[in-house]
Image: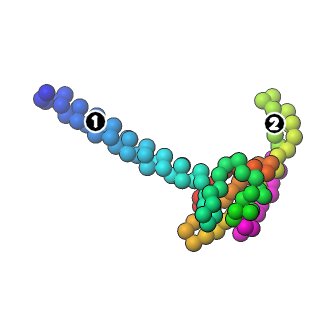
């Protein structure tokens, strides 16, 4: 194959490889924030506040908020307690977000 078709094929292949590499790098950051280590123990989604405190000790800071839970028709069904615990370390600061006592999110700052 010669000429402009070969060039187009090479450019398409190069862009495809570039897209795959970018997806791997971007995806790895999302996976890294799904876990948090306290010493040799792994903290993961769904853990209770008591279990996290047992693994990691007291957080550096705590923030509590209450959010309304709404139905699809926007009617208020109740409230959820949302707590954000911050753990600071030498390598990174992480915020663990609990909704009604269960770990729902781990953010790396």
Secondary structure mostly seen in magenta is strand
Question: Within the magenta stretch, is there residue 89?
Answer: no
Residue count near mark 2 (Cα–Cα under 10 Å), binned few <14, some 14–19, many ≥20: few
Labelled disc at residue 51: none
List x then y, in percent, for residue 50: 78, 58
Q: Quadrant of residue 61?
A: bottom right
What segment carries the magenta color? 57-67
Q: Quadrant of residue 39?
A: bottom right
Residue count near mark 1 (Cα–Cα under 10 Å), binned few <14, some 14–19, many ≥20: few
> For this rendering, which residue is in front, 46 or 30?
46
Residue at image x 74%, y 62%?
53
Residue at image x 34%, y 43%?
18
Question: Within the magenta stretch, is there residue 58?
Answer: yes
Which residue was labeled with disc 1? Answer: 13
Residue at image x 74%, y 57%?
51
Is 107 positioned to the left or the right of 18 in the image? right
Describe the element under mark 2 as helix, strand or loop: strand
Labelled disc at residue 70: 2
> Mark 1 or mark 2: which comes first in sequence?
1
Image quadrant for the N terminus? top left
């Amino acid at each position: 194959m010669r000429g402009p078709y070969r060039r187009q094929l090479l450019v398409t292949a190069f862009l495809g490889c570039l897209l795959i590499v970018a997806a791997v790098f971007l995806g790895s950051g999302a996976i890294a924030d799904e876990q948090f280590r306290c010493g040799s123990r792994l903290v993961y989604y769904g853990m209770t506040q008591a279990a996290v405190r047992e693994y990691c000790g007291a957080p550096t800071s705590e923030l509590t908020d209450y959010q309304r839970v709404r139905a699809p028709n926007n009617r208020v069904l109740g409230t959820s307690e949302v707590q954000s615990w911050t753990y600071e370390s030498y390598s990174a600061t992480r915020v663990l977000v609990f909704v009604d006592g269960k770990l729902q999110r781990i953010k790396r700052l």
